[in-house]
Image (cartoon, rainbow, N blue to C red):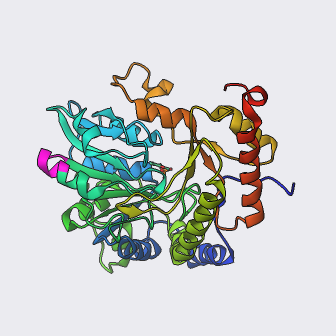
Amino acid sequence: MTGRIPVMLPWLGEAEAEAAAEAVRSGWVAQGPRVAAFERAFAERVGAEHAVAVSSCTTALHLALVALGLGPGDEVVVPSLSFIATANAVRYTGAEPVFADVELSTGNLTRATVDAVRSPRTRAVLLVHQGGVPADVDALRAACADWDLALVEDAACAIGSTVGGKPVGHGALLAAWSFHPRKIVTTGEGGMLTTDDADWAARLRRLREHGMNASAAQRHASSTPVLESYLETGYNYRMTDIQAAVGLVQLGKLDAMLERRRELAGRYAELLADVPGLTPVTDPAHGRGNFQSYWVLLAPEFPVGRDELLALLAEAGISARRGIMATHLEPAYAGHPAGPLPVTERIGRDSLILPLFHTMTEAQQDRVVAALRGAAAAGPAAGGTG
Ligand SMILES: *Cc1c(COP(=O)(O)O)cnc(C)c1O
C-alpha cells in the first residue's frame, strides 16, 4: 500500500499559482478585467452567448430563480437526488421545492418524473445534470415548453458533458455552474451563470453587485465621476479577479482533464465488468458525460452494504464517498412534503462514488478495483448484510 487515495484532487499547478500572483501584483483583486475575460472564455466553451461570474453555483442558482421572479406561493420542481444546494436555492426565494424522482440509469429527472409532481402552482423546473451525466435536455425543454414552465439547469458538475454533440449549456435558458474543488474546473470557490439572453445577462450582472447600474470596473474606467444608483435589492455575489485568473488557466486544461477522466472511467468499466452486483455509471444514449463523479450502484445481492463497503475501502486506504444524497431525507427537510421517491432512495442508499482524479495512476485504480473485488467475493458470512 502506497498512501491514501483521495476521491477527488484538483489538478492545479504552477501556472495557476503564477496567474493568481499576477492578479495580486496588478493591484486589482476584486471583480475586474480577469473576471470579464473568464466570462468570455467560459461562454464560448459551453456554447452560450453570455456568462456572468458569481461566488458559487449556489448563488448562481439563487440569482437564476430571482431573475425568474419566483417567490412565496410558487413551486419549483427539483430532484431530491442532488447536492442539497439545489433545493436550498429555491427556499432562498421563498418558493417551495417540490421533489421529483429520477431515472435509475442516469440519476436525472425525466419528463415523466416531473409530470408526476407538477401542479398549477409550478413555475419552473430545476434540472440537474447529476454527477456530470447529461440529462436529456431536449426532452425536458420540450416538456417545459408544453407546460409553460421555465427550465433552469444546475450544471454544477457538467462542464464538458455533451448532449447530441453539443456542450451542456448550449441553448439553455439559464444554466448554473460550480468551480468548487470537488468539480473538474476549480477556482477554490466560484460559480457562473450562462444564458443566451442579453437582457437577462445584464440583470444578473446587476443582481450580483447590489443592484447597481454601474459596476465598480466601469466606474474605475471612467475619467469622469459616475454616480451609480441602486435599481433593485441585489446581492454581493461577485467573483474575485484572483479566482478568475485561476479559472482561465483551468479552462485551458479542460480538454486534457476530460480526456483523462474518460480514459480512467473506461478503464474502471472494463475492470469492473465481471464484478457481480455492481453497476458503474455509463453514458446515456443521448450524450456523453465528463465522469465528474464516477459512481457505482450496488445490487441488493452485493454481499456487503454500501456503508460497510465504504468502511472496507477506507481500511484499504481508499477515500470513496456515499453516492449523491437524497435531500428529502436530511433533517433540514424534515416535515417538507414529499411523495414516493423510490429510485432516489435506492440510489441514495446503494451507490458510492469511487476515486477519479486527473493525476490518478493505473496502479491506484487497480488498488480500488482489487478492494471492490475483495468485497464482492467476501460473501454474506464475511460481510454481514449491511
Ligand atoms: C456542487 C454542487 C452545487 C453547489 O456548488 P457550489 O459552487 O459549491 O455552491 C450545486 N448543485 C450541484 C448539483 C452540485 O453538485
Q: Is residue 229 above or below residue 325?
A: below
Instruction: Residue 257: give x, y in percent of width and height.
Output: 57, 71
Task: Answer with left or right where residue 262 lies relative to residue 140.
Answer: right
Instruction: Residue 202: give x, y in percent of width and height.
Output: 25, 64
Task: Answer with left or right where residue 338 lies relative to residue 119.
Answer: right
In the picture, which quadrant includes the C terminus?
top right
Q: Can residue 235 be spotted in the picture? A: no
Residue in the picture at 57% in, 32% down: 300
Magenta residues span: 143-149
Residue in the picture at 24% in, 54% down: 139
Instruction: Residue 63: give x, y in percent of width and height.
Output: 32, 50
Q: Can residue 382 be spotted in the picture? A: yes
Task: Answer with left or right where residue 362 lies relative to residue 256.
Answer: right
Q: Is residue 84 above or below residue 241?
A: above
- Name, please, the residue furthest toward the top: 335
Of residues 80 and 65, the one drawn nearer to the viewer in this rendering: 80
Instruction: Residue 302: give x, y in percent of width and height.
Output: 63, 35
- Name, please, the residue furthest toward the bottom: 223
Residue in the picture at 72% in, 28% down: 380
In the picture, which quadrant includes the N terminus?
bottom right
